[in-house]
Image: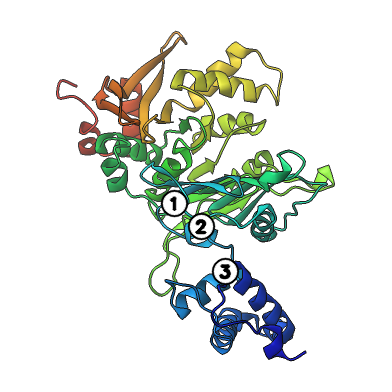
Amino acid sequence: MSDKSMFFRDKDATTSFTEILRAVQEYISNKYSVLLSEHPDEQKKQLKSYIKKFVRDYGYSIEGMTIDELVKKLYTEMAEFSFLTKYLFANNIEEININSYKDIKITYSNGSIIPSKERFNSPTHAIDVIRRLLHQSGMILDNSQPIVRGHLSNKIRITVFGNGVIDHDKGIAASIRIVNPKELKKEDFIKNGTATEEMIDFLSRSLRYGVSICITGATSSGKTTLMSYLLSTVPNDKRIITIENGTREFDLVKEDEDGTVLNNVIHTVTRDSEDERQNIDQEKLLEFALTANPDVISVAEMKSAEAFAAQEAARTGHSLTTTIHANSCEATYARMVTLCKMKYDISDNTLYKLVTEAFPIVVFSKKLEDNTRRIMEITECIIHSDGKRELQTLYRYKIKENKIVKDKYIVKGEFEKVNNMSKKLQKRLLENGLPQEKMKKFLREDE
């Protein structure tokens, strides 16, 4: 059978995109698989060229779509990640949540959640595309591993649920999280209503001048995005070491137009091994980071025994920032105590004293019902001369009204400065080099 007869069709017949895709895939695999594998650097250009030639030669078209648009869509489906591609690499998308092959919700940077107009053709199609994504991190989704977690790049996390743990007719369920796609600046936090300029400056100056900070909140509350910004404000001559679990999300290296690195950053990630003795966890990375002359250490998330090592590092004078899952500033210390006990069986009271000394500043971030993110509270734990601890609110977001208008939530509130930082914290910041003029910005005139 000739190539022409293989793909011959009646010019008046209606052809769907799926039919065209199937024909193109067969044609490309028959004709150009060897050539493509021998020229990986030219793959994209070559493949698009071959697809375009095929579409023109056999007169394929889709109503309302130019040839170039059809070629682009065919290429995306074959070599990339179907319609997900445009969302994965957009700079205003934070999450892609797939509930089934025909139910995809997109979360935008402004907090809005909008159903995708596109959908996978079938459960099998959804599985094929997600497997392509997981392949990027060497993860395999099959009957023996129906739940997997991987990454597409430094800033994209993927968690997938497959057949066996979800209904067969759903195909796939997945959460794809894109961390800080726009690398938010201070102006963005203010514009988005996340915090006031004074609050953001207070946090960045505290970290810069040796005060350790823990950012707390639920998943998708903006913890990692805020921490990434705070780390980006550290002066270029200060050495930053980041520690992340499995997947690297931070990208703090700054380069000029010539590619010269301007700042001083080391990014590290954990490594699992079948031999437990070869495991490199966050605790081990932190142990070695302390011997590498760091000025600022970031433990991306405390969720296990590394919490004890982190508080030890913070109490030795290193400036350390981290995140944790808790539902308030006050609850954060109790959560730290629980994690520290995974390492050593020390009394709760002793551990409470340690963690409050280690992290005097706690930030509680929350995603509200209207999908906006707010820093709800910034607290300081004051240690009095008799050893007693006092949790004092410095800043907070006070909600004044919750209402629903045309099925849409509206939350109204305002930021308040509640208290000045303690005299002890003022002294510590001044001793660590914070100029007095900068200090005045965070104090009421009577102080």
Q: Give SS at disc 1.
A: strand
Figure quadrant of residue 168: top right
Q: CA distance from mark 2 to mark 3?
A: 25 Å
Answer above or below: position of 251 versus 444.
Answer: below
| Element carrying mark 3 | loop
Q: Is residue 144 left or right of residue 201?
A: right
* Tag shown at residue 28: none
Q: Nearer the viewer, mark 2 or mark 3?
A: 3
Using the image, determine if residue 39 lies above or below residue 199: below
Instruction: Work out whether mark 2 precedes mark 1 in sequence or the reverse, and give the earlier one.
Output: 2
Q: Position of residue 155 (x, y in %)?
A: 53, 53
Disc 1 marks a residue whose amino acid type is Ile
**Residue shown at 57%/72% (left/top)?**
15
The residue singled out by tag 2 in the image is 88
**Nearer to the camera, 419 or 223:** 223
Asked whether disc 2 touches disc 1, contact meaning CB atoms under 8 Å apart, the reply is yes
Relative image position of residue 261 (x, y in whole percent): 45, 65
Q: Which quadrant: the C terminus?
A: top left
First in sequence, mark 1 or 3: give its number: 3
* Type of amino acid at the residue the image marks with label 2: Leu
Mark 1 to mark 3 CA distance (whole Å): 29 Å
Q: Which residue is mark 3?
A: 16
How far across and how far down the image is residue 308, in percent? 63, 28
Q: Residue furthest left?
A: 445
* Quadrant of the snapshot with the N terminus: bottom right
* Residue bearing mark 1: 93
Q: Earlier in the sequence, mark 2 or mark 3?
A: 3
State the scheme by which the image is colored.
rainbow
